[in-house]
Amino acid sequence: MIRASKRAMGIEYAIRDVVLPARELEKKGIKVIRLNIGDPVKYDFQPPEHMRKAYCEAIMEGHNYYGESEGDFELRKAIVEREKKKNGVDITPDDVRVTAAVTEALQFIFGAAIDSGDEILIPGPSYPPYVGLVKFYDGIPVEYRTIEEEGWQPDVDDIRKKITERTKAIAVINPNNPTGALYDRKVLKEILDIACEHGLFVISDEIYDLMTYDGEHVSPASITKDVPVIVMNGLSKVYFSTGWRLGYMYYVDPEGKLDELREAIDKMARIRLCPNTPAQKAAIAGLTGPMDYLREYMVKLRERRDYIYKRLNEIPGISTQKPQGAFYIFPKIEEGPWKSDKEFVLDVLHEAHVLFVHGSGFGRNGAGHFRAVFLPSVEILEQAMDSLEAFMRKRLSS
Ligand code: PLP
């Protein structure tokens, strides 16, 4: 047998791993309500019409060639305008790189920054590729605590404690996946202060930036003075275009501390040639076009969030914080016979036919929890919550 690399064989991705047992049930004709994957386009959301048209037109008009490795200049200009308006940042198209979505930006950043044994501080719980990709590049992902009772805000003291000689960067995912937390300006300021003290840079994942319910997103890029910040964003969530695989990153680095990293990232960008050309034309339409679709979609998402939050807190043995952004909720399993959160999730799947993701799949700090997406309609969420409630009542009384 030809051996695969340990690096690749070690990769885990809980969100998709739980799909295999669900598929087995579905093969037997059992209907499973899937609340595991954060893809709005699988539900009643689509990219706005002006973006879809622009994508089709780009193809028909012949924009089907290899583009620049940095990304389309017009698009980088549009990104600068969007980000100036949203975050007040002082950047030019030269500070922007277009990527195959945030996932490729993460590969670029970790690939360019990590030498063997370097540490990246990531929120715990965390979106799984932060663990997987840091490890893939032979680095060490170090989870910092986020505080459930405070709506999953980062524990700044814990960040301080976890800094070592090998720490390179602090990653911030805000609004957060899997907790739906929206980070306070004060906490972000403190994170920047720690980064400043230790000569670190901040990686800011803002893929859900305009998807907030009870407050506004604050970017560390908007409040940094001299700490370098790399912001990542893209079309997948706010522009409802998950399958187009398009995103971007930009540097806010007034003192040029990231110059070498930028050069390394450009080398990585060149060996992967370029991002998707027609999708970039659609992105220009999205970033410069009307946003009224988002208002409409957020009305639906808010109704779904309010519904699932209320129902989950009424179910015995379960409690949950209220998500302030994105479309995830991260409840706690308060009591029950299960030895682990994964056992709980599989039991719910087999008995109640609802698919969640186990909290420990998002790192050690996620243990004892599970993640649900609230993207389906209230009617579907109601079915899922009814099944979960019946399941919990049965398990807790036996
Ligand atoms: N970052 C976070 C926090 C996410 O939740 C996701 C997807 O769920 C991604 C990045 C992936 O984004 P993209 O589709 O742009 O690769």
Image (cartoon, rainbow, N blue to C red):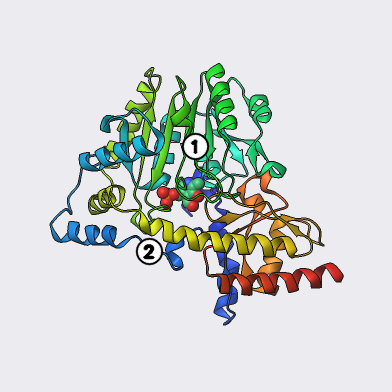
Identify which residue, 338 or 333, lies in the foreground.
Answer: 333
Residue 254, position as x, y percentages in the image: 38, 20
Q: Is residue 42 left or right of residue 127?
A: left
Residue 280, position as x, y percentages in the image: 26, 49
Q: Residue at x 27, y 41 (%)?
A: 78
Provide the secondary structure element on which disc 2 rests. Answer: loop
Mark identifier at residue 148: none
Residue 40, position as x, y percentages in the image: 46, 61
Identify whether 346 is placed above or below 294.
Answer: below
Whole-number angstrom distance, CA of label 2 to CA of label 1 = 26 Å
Q: Are marks 2 and 1 in contact (CB under 8 Å)?
A: no
Residue beneath disc 2: 46
Provide the secondary structure element on which disc 1 rests. Answer: loop
Residue beneath disc 1: 218
- Name the amino acid, label 2: Gln
- Name the amino acid, label 1: Val
Q: Quadrant of residue 233?
A: top left
Residue 193, position as x, y percentages in the image: 56, 21
